[in-house]
Amino acid sequence: MKFISKAALIFLFLAILVLLISGNLFSRSPVVIAGQIAAVLLAVWARRSFEPAQFSIHAEPIGKSLLSTGPYRFIRHPMYTAALLLLWTSILGHVSPLNVGLGLLVTAVIFVRMVTEEQFLQTTYPDYVTYAGKTKRIIPYVL
């Protein structure tokens, strides 16, 4: 599971790098810019919700207790939500079969990482199942 987690993160960064190098990451569209700003703000809010030394880029729990403050009150994976929002707003600003295919592939990889992370969390935190029943994975109150 650690391999899946690390490989998924590397894949996400490579996809964003491909969009950046190809000139498809940024757009002049106000909708795209607003989505990207929202993605960055969500990522910062989620990151600031962690206690010192609790945050890890790996899908392995580090803290003593389950994080359920900040955006984690509404969604279980705000960092992945932010990454997907950044990715898909970029793709919508530069729609092409290649970009859409890349987006679908990254979305699938992130989903696998979420499932893997949730397995770690269920093992570490007994109250995770209850928390998961109250919060949605990536879109508050929806999905």
Image: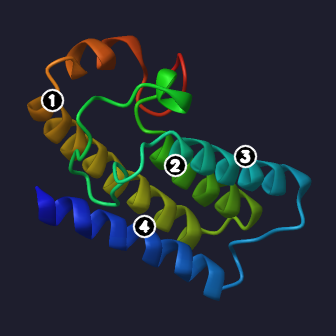
Residue 136 sits above or below residue 115 on the image? above
Q: Which mark is residue 47?
A: 2
Distance Cα–Cα, label 3 vs label 2? 14 Å
Mark drawn on residue 38: 3
Q: Callout 3: 10 Å neighbours few (<14), some, many (20+)? A: some
- Give the distance between the C-alpha atoms of the residues marked 1 and 4, in whole angstroms: 24 Å
Q: Which mark is residue 12?
A: 4
How far apart marks 1 and 3 lie (CA) works out to 29 Å
Residue positioned 68% across, 62% down in the render: 90
* Amino acid type, callout 1: Gln
Q: Where on the picture, by quarter, is residue 48?
A: top right
Taking 74 as reference, is 91 above or below it? below
Q: What residue lies at 45% left-to-right and 73% top-to-bottom?
A: 13
Disc 2 or disc 1, which is closer to the eye?
Answer: 2
Q: Earlier in the sequence, mark 4 or mark 2?
A: 4
Q: Quadrant of residue 19?
A: bottom right
How far apart are the alpha carbons under marks 3 and 4? 18 Å
Query: In terms of depth relative to the viewer, which is nearer, 138 or 131?
Result: 131
Q: Residue at x 48, y 67 (%)?
A: 102
Mark 1 residue element: helix
Mark 1 highlights which residue? Answer: 122
Q: Is residue 67 found left or right of 71 in the rendered image?
A: left
